[in-house]
Image: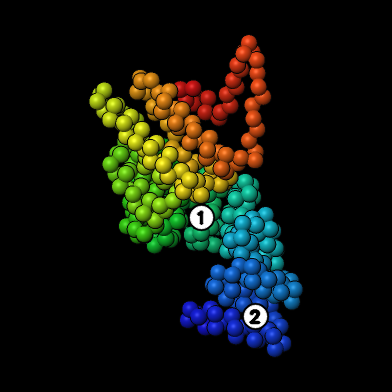
Amino acid sequence: LLQEGKPAQARAALELAVGSGIDEGPLWLLLSNACLALQDPIAALKAIDSGLLRAPAFAEAHNNRGIILVELGRISEARQSFANAVAARPDYIRAWTNLSGAALQLGDAHQADTAAQRAIALDATYGLGHLAAGRAAMALERYAEAETCFQQAVRLMPTAVEPLMALAGLFDLRQRAQDARDILQRAISMAPQRPDLWFMLGNSCMALDDLGAALQAFAQAQAAWPDSLEVASRAALMLPNILANREHIEACRARFAKGLDYLEANLPRLLKSVNESNISRVLQTNFLLGYHGCTDLALQKRSGALVSATARHAVGKQLTRIAPRSKRDRIRIGFCSRLFYDSTA
């Protein structure tokens, strides 16, 4: 029934089986899979835990438990479940790969790297292992190694989009926008319905100053994600890196102001897409305004108001008011950045 795409009937049959006394670990694992197919992760977790009570060394159950916990956002518990899976079965390649992914989400790139390398050592033709290794290497800033891993994953998984996305993300990080664009166009030809691919393509086109193509790509992403502040702000506030003349500058600034109009008018709706995990990336920077040689105060105030409203929505409880000061006090400002060593700053 599960293989025929009938999870509700499968769940009913399995519940009847376990209820009639056929109390075995693999049966509970099947029941968990049926619940997961029905988008009921809580019931799936309950079933998998029942299975593990009967078979505590059941590696597949530990691995599936980790997958469910990832879906529930309980990443630390998921990592432990994946670790239990490989402890029960050290040659469990998929569990090593899942352990790598969970560790990376928790910021432990070294464990992610170790787990991914273990998966590759067990099977050098396992594309997901190379993909996981590339992500770990990228987090560890071993970029040449990451590219090699991603390219290998692309070769081993020629019909999969994820290795191409990872490679494009690396190229974007390394300011290889044309390479990223080429890879993304290949990925979109395979999965044109994926809005995340169109969004990435828009960013690559923007970096290449092809704003027309960027707008077209962002429009595709917005069609699927109409309430995303991240997509809307990219489309509304993009500015070119290279300016042709004074008329070009004035046209860009007028478009930027119209973009602010749109975001201000739609902010209550768009703010629903913002949370603590994405607050740092949802608003397009206005950095390039500084190259226009114009008075930016009005535009900067409006941009600042958007940032303030977005921050209050996402992390308002963490914000503290600046203590009042005497007008005679000197204003002291501190700057913290990892970019001072390799930029114009």
User: Toward which corner of the image does residue 250 lie, by quadrant?
Assistant: top left
Residue 305 falls left or right of residue 325: left
Q: Residues within 10 Å of mark 1 (few under 14, many from 20)?
A: many
Vertical arrangement, residue 22 with respect to residue 321, above or below: below
> Which residue is more in the foreground, 159 or 45?
45
- Give how far apart the Cα atoms at labels 2 and 1 are: 32 Å
Rendered residue at 52%/38% (across/down) = 309
> Which residue is more in the foreground, 41 or 111?
41
Q: Residues within 10 Å of mark 2 (few under 14, many from 20)?
A: some
Q: In this rendering, which labeled residue sits more in front, label 2 or label 1?
A: 2
Residue 124 falls left or right of residue 88: left
Dot 1 amino acid type: His
> Which residue is more in the foreground, 45 or 330?
330
The answer to whether mark 2 and mark 1 are in CB contact below 8 A is no
Res. 154 visible in picture: no
Label 1 belongs to which residue?
Answer: 130
Looking at the picture, how far across and down is residue 180, in whole percent? 38, 45
**Which type of secondary structure does the marked residue at label 2 adopt?**
helix
Looking at the picture, how far across and down is residue 269, in whole percent? 46, 48
Vertical arrangement, residue 73 with respect to residue 295, above or below: below
Looking at the picture, how far across and down is residue 307, in whole percent? 50, 35
Sequence-earlier tag: 2 or 1: 2
Rendered residue at 59%/70% (across/down) = 40
Dot 2 amino acid type: Leu
Label 2 belongs to which residue?
Answer: 27
**Which type of secondary structure does the marked residue at label 1 adopt?**
helix
Rendered residue at 48%/45% (across/down) = 268
Vertical arrangement, residue 238 with respect to residue 163, above or below: above
Mark carried by residue 177? none
> Which residue is more in the foreground, 51 or 247?
247
Residue at the far top: name it.
328
Looking at the picture, how far across and down is residue 153, in whole percent? 46, 56
